[in-house]
Structure formats: structure tokens, C-alpha cells
Image (cartoon, grey):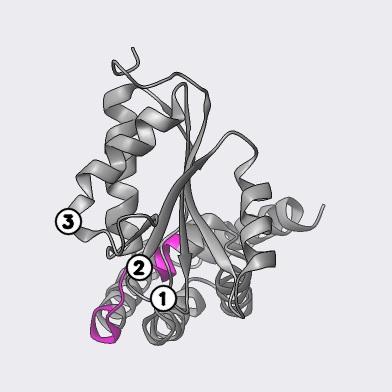
Amino acid sequence: MAASGVRSKAGFVYVLSNEAMPGIVKIGMTARNPEVRLRELNASTGVLPFTLEAVIASRNARWTEGEVHERLAARRVSKNREFFKVDVEEARRIIFNVARQQRQRVLLRGRKRIAPGAAVTLALTTSPAAGAVHPYLLPVWLLLCLAAALTGRPRLVRELLGATDRVISAALVGSLMLTCALLFNQIIGHDSFAAASMMLSELRRILFL
């Protein structure tokens, strides 16, 4: 049910970020495709483009936007602007909470940014674990990490690379995975190579066919 006094009009509420404005997001609404709105903003603004971080579809976009703005009123940069001093993750949490309470639909959740140092550390420290399972798995794993960092796919690998933003934590995760891989080989023995070969063949079929 729409809030009283707020005219009902379906649309989208979005969160945008821009590297030129760290710690600040734009939260607005549009009745059109948010991607179209994004292109318009990027065509009319400065050097660095905006990034679409989250989108929810609302039966009453003005009501939903108003609720989100009200929760962030103390962090509003300017009264007449839709910019707020809040990081992307917190902005997502707030609009998703509003969407859940109003029973609106989440269309884009965005993705957590990867900390480069931690991601590289995690990729390198988990590589010995991949090699311990099967020698051929090592180059495949490194290629998957590179693809995940550049394109966001495979999603599971990207989630792993973005699991921590601390280099030390990433190194500990890699060490733990290596220990598990060595234990796996010790328990399963040489049969693990045959199993890993079958898994690699299936992976190649999925990725390249």
C-alpha cells in the first residue's frame, strides 16, 4: 500500500557511485530504465562516469525514494541534491531494507569491490592448493582469478577474491586452503588426480562449449 499523500507511480530507485566522490552516493528514482538514466548522467557530467550499484523496482517509486532519503536525511550533502555521505555497502543495505519492508523487488544488488592487494594475495596463496590437488589445476585457477577480477565471472571465484580486504586475512585463507588440499591428497591418494582430471574436463566443457 502506498503512503498517504504520495502519488503512486511505478518506477525504479537506484544507487550510483563515482570514483571522483569517494564516500558519497547518489540515490534517486526514474520511471525509465535505470541504464538510460545512467547514460544520461554520464553524458552530462565530468570526467569519471557513475557506476550503477543497486536498483529496486517499486510500485510507487516516489514513496520508496522518499523513505530512503528520510533515513539518510542527516547525511544529505545538500537539501536540493540527491547526494549522501554514505558508502555504497551501507546505501545498499538501507534501500534493500526499505524494499523488503515495502515488499518491492530488488533488480540489481551490485557487487562488492575487490581490494586489489588482498585479491592478488588470495589468488597467489591459493594457487599452491590448486596445484596440490592437480598440476593442471594451477594455470586454470590463475586464469579463473584473472577473469573474475576483470569481468566479475565466474561469480563464485569473484566472491572468493572479494571475501576480504585485508592482505593478512587473504594469506591466512590461502594457507588454510593449501592445508585442506594436502590433507585431501593424503586421504584420497592418487585417485584424486583422476577425479580432478574429470572435474577439469567438465569445467572446460562448461566454459568453452
Of residues 77 and 92, the one nearer the viewer is: 77
Look at mark 1 in the image and give the residue it sits on: 21
Upstream in the sequence, badge 3 or badge 2? 2
Quarter of the view holding residue 201: bottom right
Q: Quadrant of the N terminus?
A: top left
Q: Which residue is mark 2?
A: 24
Is 80 or 116 nearer to us in this picture? 80
Please name the amino acid that badge 1 sits on.
Met
* Quarter where residue 5 is shown: top left
Range of residues picked out in magenta: 159-169
Q: Is residue 73 left or right of residue 104?
A: left
- Disc 2 from disc 1: Cα separation: 6 Å
Which mark is on residue 189?
Answer: none
Other residues around mark 1 within 10 Å, as few (<14) / some (14–19) / many (≥20): few
Q: Position of residue 161 (x, y in %)?
A: 43, 70
Label 2: how many residues lie within 10 Å, few (<14), some (14-19) or many (20+)? Answer: many
Secondary structure, mark 2, is loop
Drawn side of residue 205 relative to residue 34, left or right: right
Relative horizontal placement of residue 129, taking residue 208 as reference (left or right): left
Which residue appears at 41% of the width and 62% of the height? 112
Residue 28: give x, y in percent of width and height: 45, 47
Q: Are marks 2 and 1 in contact (CB under 8 Å)?
A: yes
Residue indicated by mark 3: 74
**Dots 3, 1 in contact, CB < 8 A:** no
Kind of element beneath mark 1: loop
